[in-house]
Image: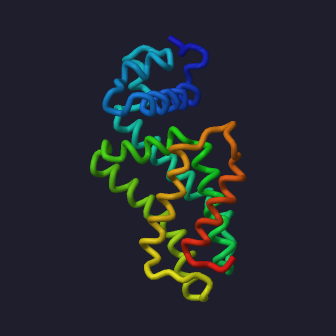
Amino acid sequence: MARKQGSHSDITGPRIHAAALKLFAEHGFAAVSMRQIAAEVGVQAGAIYNYVPHKQALLANLMRGHMDGLLADIEPHLPEGDPMAALDAFVRFHIGYHLDRVDLVFISYMELRALEPENFDLITRLRGDYEKRLERILIDGTRDGVFDIADPKITTLALIAMLTGVTNWYREGGRLDQGDIADHYAAMARRMVCAAP
């Protein structure tokens, strides 16, 4: 018997991931069942397993996709040889990327504890790879006398937390647009590293 039109894996698979993202963000990973995800997509509960083996795989795939995209997209944005410009570019990229993916960011931070050990280790390693991009900028800027930082690692973690925190409160249509927010945060980042205006 032929599959129904629109049920091909390259259509249904992404719809399952989109439904899981929505439901995990609204209700939390633990509270969502595979049956609910199937209902959201409009497939039979048993049919969902043709596309994903279990709920843990869905969560891991969402987080892995987020980190893979983040790591791939950051590279072209970072200029070489100018730590100040690289810091500014990192801040603006991070804010723009994350504000366009608020639900995914929320899940990636709030549901990290729900990952099984192998998946947890993978995601935390990928996060570390991303953080090293910023830490390298701070180390280079300190070496060149552009920044005055006692501990680049701690400063990296503080900056990442500050930048990602925008997703907790920013709403489209507010007093400031994304560009304004990026300007403010770029200025705060410069002050945090004691950079000259």
Name which quarter of the figure residue 111 lies in. top left
Q: So how many labels did they put on this image? A: 0
Task: Say which of 9 and 63 sits in front.
Answer: 63
At a point 61% along the width and 39% down the height, the residue shown is 171
Name which quarter of the figure residue 115 lies in. top left
At a point 54% along the width and 71% down the height, the residue shown is 192
Task: Say which of 101 and 88 sits in front.
Answer: 88
Q: For this view, does 168 lie left or right of residue 44?
A: right
- Residue 131 locus on image (x, y percent): 48, 65
- Residue 72 locus on image (x, y percent): 59, 57
Above or below residue 84? Residue 2 is above
- Residue 185 locus on image (x, y percent): 62, 60
Task: Say which of 110 and 168 sits in front.
Answer: 168
Colour scheme shown: rainbow
Task: Say which of 105 and 118 sits in front.
Answer: 105
At a point 33% along the width and 56% down the height, the residue shown is 121
Most extreme residue toward the left is: 117
Above or below residue 109? Residue 195 is below
At a point 68% along the width and 63% down the height, the residue shown is 76
